[in-house]
Amino acid sequence: MRADPGPSLHFGGNAGDYLAYRPDYPEALFAWLAAAAPARGLAWDCGAGSGQAATGLARHFGRVLATERDPRQLALAPRRANIEWRLAAAEDDPGLDGTVDLIACACSLHWFDLPRFYRNAARALKPGGLVAAWTYDWPWTGAPALDAVLERLKTDILGPFWGATAPLYFSGYRDLPFPFPELEPPAFTTAIAESPADLSRFLSTWSAVSRYRDRHGRDPLALVDEALARAWRDRPPPLPLAVPLHLRCGYKAF
């Protein structure tokens, strides 16, 4: 499957918002990945964005290589002594032949040219090394009125602006080709919001919202902000509002 043209470049135009409003991932996820990896020497974070996964990996691995193709995202990434940031696409060969303990793709794998990336991944991993790719779906709350507003935004307003790879993350990566023997991971969730304003800021970072703004010159969230706030007020969801992480994890056979 070929990636959407110009994949992660969708997010560079609002890189500051992406850094501020995309959620961090749970510490339990990184601890589990570190325990499942054959060693904790080197992790490669592909499509690293502004560093939400790389910083978590750096707490568990001696060295992290974080590659990102958009210099606007890279410029905002946090600096850590054991993270090397590199301007590169996931399909570029990083020259790590047989040395990588873990390859992580946080909300990024669906953007890649998968055959090219998987060839690089197989070359970079040591025997028994892991590939872990995770994403989250569009947020749902369990509150009917609030979810109706979110469905209207996702389908009626943003429907024409989702990219060709949208079915992969809306299916929780279940339909994504994954050519590695798989491990069964635990269930993980990540918090995204404590308020309607938090939820709107999170939604503002999605690629279809950027495409809508580019096409129409206005913010699609303005069409639902009042309804979203009213539905939240009438029946607040459990806080913090969290979404499940959909994780595919496999290993390079010996």
Image (cartoon, rainbow, N blue to C red):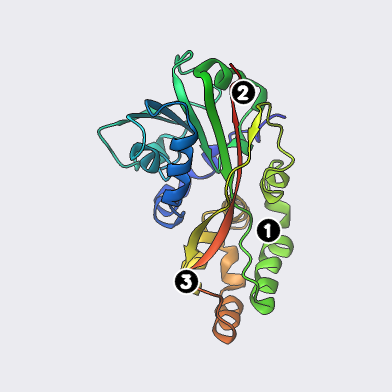
Q: Nearer the viewer, mark 1 or mark 3?
A: 3
Residue under label 3, please give it.
197
Q: Where residue 47 sits: x, y (%)?
A: 50, 35
Q: Where residue 24 sits: x, y (%)?
A: 43, 52
Which circle's residue, 3 or 2, is located before the other in the chain?
Answer: 2
What amino acid is labelled 2 in the image?
Tyr
Q: Gap between marks 1 and 3, in whole Å?
A: 19 Å
Vertical placement of 54 versus 199: above or below? above
Q: Crowdedness of circle 1 by 10 Å Cα count: few (<14), some, many (20+)?
A: some
Q: Quadrant of residue 79?
A: top left
Q: Where residue 29 sits: x, y (%)?
A: 48, 46
The reply to whether the C-beta atoms of the residues labelled 1 and 3 are less than 8 Å apart is: no
Instruction: Identify the residue shown where x is 63% and y is 41%.
Output: 184
Residue 92 seen by the camera: no
Instruction: Identify the residue shown where x is 67% and y is 79%.
Output: 145
Q: Where residue 228 sits: x, y (%)?
A: 59, 76
What amino acid is labelled 3 in the image?
Ala
Residue 158, numbered circle: 1
Q: Gap between marks 2 and 1, in whole Å?
A: 31 Å
Indicate left or right for 28 with 147 as reference.
left
The reply to whether the C-beta atoms of the residues labelled 3 and 2 are less than 8 Å apart is: no
Q: Secondary structure at mark 2?
A: helix
Which residue extends farthest left? 81
Instruction: Identify the residue shown where x is 66% and y is 36%.
Output: 4
What amino acid is labelled 1 in the image?
Leu
Vertical placement of 41 versus 243: above or below? above
Indicate left or right for 161 with 47 as reference.
right
Residue under label 2, please give it.
118
Q: Secondary structure at mark 1?
A: loop
